[in-house]
Image (spheres, helix red, strand yellow):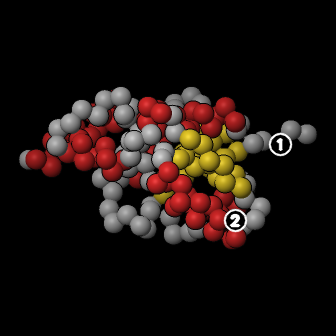
Amino acid sequence: MSISRVAIYPGSFDPLTNGHTSIIARGLNMFDKVIVAVAHNVRKSSTMFTVEERVSFIEQAFPNHNVEIDTFASMLLVDYARAKGCNVILRGLRAVSDFEYELQLANMNRRLAPDIETVFMMTEEAHFYVSSSLIKEVARFGGDVRGMVPDHVVDALHQKYLDTQD
């Protein structure tokens, strides 16, 4: 009997970056399926893009892959993972500054759910400095974010900032 290896990659993805797409693509080399869980992050006061827009960004980036896109809110990640029948959480690390926070999350998740493992994947060097927040700031002031986000996200960022200037 073959066991399906499934990982959950949670995040707000506001917006999706090439760092995110790299983690998803590389995760697919390790797992049979990656569930990209678009979360409403209670630590973030607002998002630029709706949940539907963020889901669409991921769908456009991974149209024919073993990627399931889902959303979740108002529950612990480990409870969501259990509900999906998954025991692996995939997380990306960009820099040392990410590590402390991610280690705290992983240890709390381990305390809450010892049967669920967290797997860390280092972001590729080309994307280690890129965060969704930084992308939005650069785009807000007209900076070029091509190569840091998928092309369809570049277009959405430009449109979003054109709409706010009217």
Q: Residues within 10 Å of mark 2 (few under 14, many from 20)?
A: some
Q: Give the percent coordinates (x, y) of residue 146.
A: 31, 29
Q: What amino acid type should be assigned to the residue bearing mark 2?
A: Arg
Quarter the N terminus occupies: top right
Q: What amino acid type should be assigned to the residue bearing mark 1?
A: Ile
Q: Residue at x 77, y 61 (%)?
A: 115
Q: How far apart in space, not on screen, are marks 1 and 2 (Cα)?
A: 22 Å
Q: Give the percent coordinates (x, y) of residue 94.
A: 48, 45
For the question of whether residue 58 can be seen, the reply is no
Question: Of residues 132 and 16, which is closer to you in this image?
Answer: 132
Question: Of residues 57 and 78, which is closer to you in this image?
Answer: 78
For the question of whether residue 23 can be seen, the reply is yes
Q: Give the percent coordinates (x, y) of residue 87.
A: 73, 54
From the viewer's perspective, is 155 left or right of 91?
Answer: left
Quick one: SS at disc 1? Answer: loop
Against 34, residue 50 (above or below) is: below
From the viewer's perspective, is 47 left or right of 97?
Answer: left
Q: Which residue is mark 2?
A: 110
Q: Residue furthest left?
A: 166
Q: Residue furthest front?
A: 96
Quick one: SS at disc 2? Answer: helix
Q: Residue at x 66, y 49 (%)?
A: 119
From the viewer's perspective, is 109 left or right of 21?
Answer: right
Q: Which residue is mark 1?
A: 3
